[in-house]
Amino acid sequence: MAPSVLLKKGYGRLGRGWAALVAGWSLALPALGQAPAEPVDQIRAALKAYDQTPAEREKALRTQAERLVSLQEVRQALELVEWHSPESGSGLARVDAQVRAELVDRLAEGYRKVLAGSDKALKGRLLETLTDCTKGRSGGRGVLDACSLVAAELGTVARGNEPEQGVMAIELLGRVPVPASALVGLLEPCLLPDSPLRRLAVADALGEMARRETQAASGQQANPGRSLEQLLTVTKLLGRLTVDDQVRVRRASLDATLNLAQLAHAVATDRSPLPAGEGEQARDLATGNASRLTTTLAGKVLVCLRDPDAETRRKAQGCLAELLRVRASLMENTRAGTDPMAAMLRPCLGTLGEALRDPEVRVRRAALECLEILAEESAPCGSAVLETLVDPDAFARWGAIRVLVAQGKAAPEGAREQIQARVEDKDADVRAAAEGALRRLRK
């Protein structure tokens, strides 16, 4: 039976003859750039015909959809930019959404058969193709939708006996639009003690998911508070990854932590009008989730501030700086005004004071950024800041001046005199900062 006949038997069922279908798919990566098949062009033409009735539109789309022979053609049809947005609510949009969903089901069924099959080579080629065509912000939306329907199968591959395929499956899971709680359930079994590459892939996948949610939070119809509520489940995995015995895993987990902190910051600073039908309780719920996430992440970052790896310490300082910004926004903008980091501020200050004497200059610079955000609350680190005024690194000396200015009246005794000495600093930026600081401190 010809593949075209098989595909006419339904959008969700491919029937027998699977080998013939795959043969027409061309899984190899070069096929991604092939010109669309003639039925794909006809689907584009049907989508651009705005003078149709919904019935005419449905008939035209289904006629051409039945002519799609391979999964590659189905994928190309789904990638067309002419599909109506389902939010438009018109009759044509409803037809487009229905036919597109059926094509997604059809693509997902094809992926499911490969992923659940025993052909390891074919499975590897599929994963390579899917990984390639979902990269970047413009990665195939139709493919991602189809992958979300086979997330369970991807999870099976992710924790299976083929490490290379497992890593690719984990990478895909980080991109597909599935709820965070479901993703955590799929990724947790992949934290295998004997597979650091898979643990690294899990950390990267969590970071990718957080980036996706942060980008979505900036949309016109976004509700970042709800996104944040789902992402609270992710901290369970981050807690294990930030203490992993592999330094690359710890670094990647901090990248994911930073992305989550940035989403929390978007929620904490969001003062846009509330969606229709939602009161201030919705905003309170969102900021409450941001506060809980800030508390949880800060506890995990605190452990990494003393990591034996300098780059990990620097990344941890960067995460802490972002969390301190979230803290400041929450305390300023929320009705409760509670401090989400009250219990850990003292140990944070102790570690930041130590970091100003770190042998790695980037760690010292990052610690100064945190202290500047804390402003007068950083006063317990005042003596260490004064020492940094003679740091060999000009950026560190410049940062120390900024911290002392931010501390204001809480700055340690002798701060003005030591800043005065920096007016003769060999670095022009440090001299300028010292002169500006003295003008501010006289006020």
Image (cartoon, rainbow, N blue to C red):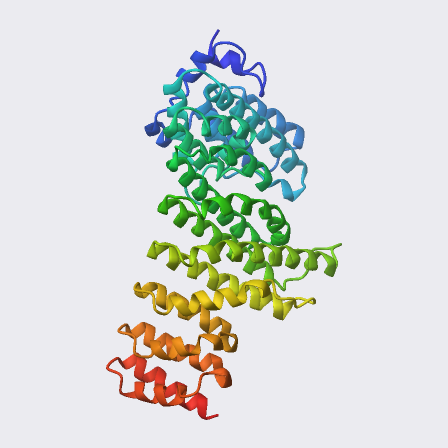
Tell which residue pokes out farthest to the top in this image. Answer: 1
Left or right: where does residue 344 sit relative to residue 134? right
Q: How many marks?
A: 0
Can you say whether 84 is above or below 398 in the image? above
Q: Residue at x 36, y 68 (%)?
A: 365
Residue 342 occupies which quadrant of the picture? Answer: bottom right
Can you say whether 69 is above or below 46 in the image? above
Can you say whether 34 is above or below 371 in the image? above
Q: Position of residue 372 (x, y in %)?
A: 45, 73
Q: Position of residue 239 (x, y in %)?
A: 51, 47
| Residue 420 visible in the snapshot | yes
Q: Position of residue 52 (x, y in %)?
A: 62, 33
Can you say whether 366 is above or below 208 in the image? below
In depth, the one of 141 and 195 nearer the eye is 195
Tell which residue pokes out farthest to the left in this image. Answer: 426
In depth, the one of 181 and 308 nearer the eye is 308
| Residue 35 visible in the snapshot | no
Left or right: where does residue 155 sit relative to residue 35? right
In depth, the one of 317 and 80 nearer the eye is 317
Q: Residue at x 35, y 25 (%)?
A: 28
Q: Position of residue 236 (x, y in %)?
A: 55, 44
Tell which residue pokes out farthest to the bottom in this image. Answer: 442
